[in-house]
Amino acid sequence: MLTLYQLEGCPYCERVADRLEELDIDYESVWVEGLHSTRDEVKRVSGQRQVPVIVDEEYGVTMAESERIVDYLETTYA
């Protein structure tokens, strides 16, 4: 299962979500708070508070930064 931590209205998060849908990858969305200081769950899984973040349990990957995530998805799932 793949989990995407994202923020509503975030264009970087939308880019990752769009690519997940284009590749027909099932994923769970976790919507985070707007304030960085309240993103404790993101910090717990990734060590930082920025989004987007994906957690790919199948491959043991946790990753931030939309460009890196899209590259990973294309390499791993395309």
Image (spheres, grey):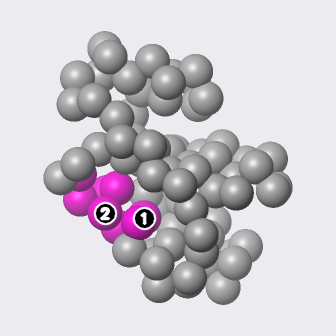
Residue type, label 1: Val
Q: Residue at x 58, y 21 (%)?
A: 44
Q: In the shown orientation, is residue 14 left or right of residue 71?
A: left
Instruction: Find numbered disc 2 in the image and state the secondary structure of the residue it sits on.
Output: helix
> Does 13 lie within the magenta span?
yes
Residue type, label 2: Glu
> Does 70 lie within the magenta span?
no
Residue in the foreground of this view, choosing between 26 and 20? 26
| Residue 67 picture location, percent across and down | 45, 62
Q: What mark, if any, has residue 16 been given in the picture?
A: 1
- State which quadrant residue 36 falls in: top left
Q: In the shown orientation, is residue 27 left or right of residue 40?
A: right
Say above or below: 17 vs 77.
above
Say above or below: 4 vs 45.
below
Identify the residue position indicated by label 2 in the image: 14
Q: Residue at x 23, y 59 (%)?
A: 11
| Residue 16 picture location, percent across and down | 42, 64
Stretch of the chain drawn in magenta:
10-17
